[in-house]
Image: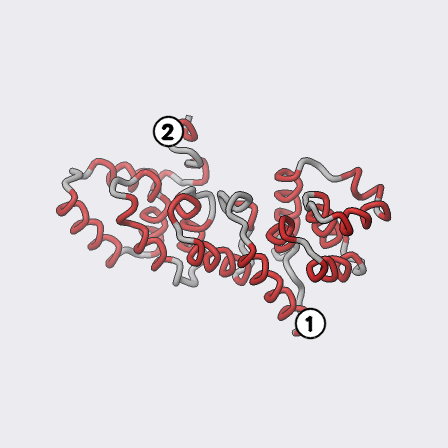
Amino acid sequence: QADNLIAGFQPHYWDQLQTARTVLLLSYPQNKEVWFTTMNQLFETADMHEHQALFASLPLMPFQEDLIPRAIDGLRTNISLVFDAIALNNPFAAKFFPEANWNQMVLKSIFMQRPLYRIQGLEERRNPTLAAIARDFAHERWAAGREVMPEIWRLISPFINEEYLEDLKKVLATKDELQIKAALLAIITSAYLPAKEILESYPTQVAALDLEAVEWEKIGTEFQQTRV
């Protein structure tokens, strides 16, 4: 029912207080000048949980295109509760963000190690620039001897070429089953034929992979559990 109201609306992630705050917001008279005066005051004085409610309710608010700068500015936060309200389980960014701001949001999600599978529109808004940024980030992590979140390889899948394939071969050479699963899934959904040939060496793992979106969620969930 929520999705029929607003495509991608997921209120099951909200608590009662967040929902009550949103109801109050939607009850306010929607004269544009008066509404924005009040909303701007709320955004400027809100505490962490109030910001969470404000940003999560963006797809329900009136005058949405005028709220794009406010949402982009909100991504500056390093408070995961607030950042998640914009980036995760929220259709607003996928619908309205310009590509540069979208890429910045996804990159920060990677940097903060947030679950990428919960970014709405991630599949549809993958782009070559974002793939290159993700690859550079992975190289930086490797150079520092740090792990790379496996969901990164989802971002490069449509753009796999010789260079990206070398990275995936490096991932497949590890003994990390989660990383291997992510690399194989990226290759399966790629159109790059030289990459497809690699799948013949992993028949058991490939056969065990589920539907793409479901499998990426499994990978993301399992990676998050290893960090707890």
For badge 2, the amino acid type reads: Leu
Front-most of 214 and 66? 66
Neighbor class of circle 2 (other Cα within 10 Å; few <14, some 14-19, many 20+) is few
Where 219 sits versus 77, above or below? above
As drawn, the label of residue 221 is none
Q: Classify residue 136 as left or right of residue 102.
A: right
Where 167 sits versus 202, above or below? below
Residue pictured at 29% horizontal, 42% vertical? 21
Q: Are marks 2 and 1 in contact (CB under 8 Å)?
A: no
Q: Which residue is mark 1?
A: 145
Q: Kindly indicate the quadrant of the structure image that contains residue 172.
A: bottom right
Residue pictured at 72% horizontal, 59% vertical? 162
Work out whether mark 2 precedes mark 1 in sequence or the reverse, and give the earlier one: 2
Residue pictured at 43% horizontal, 63% vertical? 78
Where 76 sits versus 20, above or below? below
How far apart are labels 2 and 1 at the CA level?
46 Å
On-image quarter of the C terminus: bottom right
Q: Classify residue 78 as left or right of residue 221.
A: left
The mark total stands at 2
Q: Kindly indicate the quadrant of the structure image that contains residue 99.
A: bottom left
The percent coordinates of residue 77 (x first, y second) are 39, 62
Q: Classify residue 90 as left or right of residue 223.
A: left
The percent coordinates of residue 192 (x first, y second) are 71, 49
Q: Classify residue 140 as left or right of residue 34.
A: right
The percent coordinates of residue 225 (x first, y second) are 63, 51
For badge 1, the amino acid type reads: Gly
**Which structural element holds mark 1?**
loop
**Which structural element holds mark 2?**
helix
Q: Which residue is mark 2?
A: 5
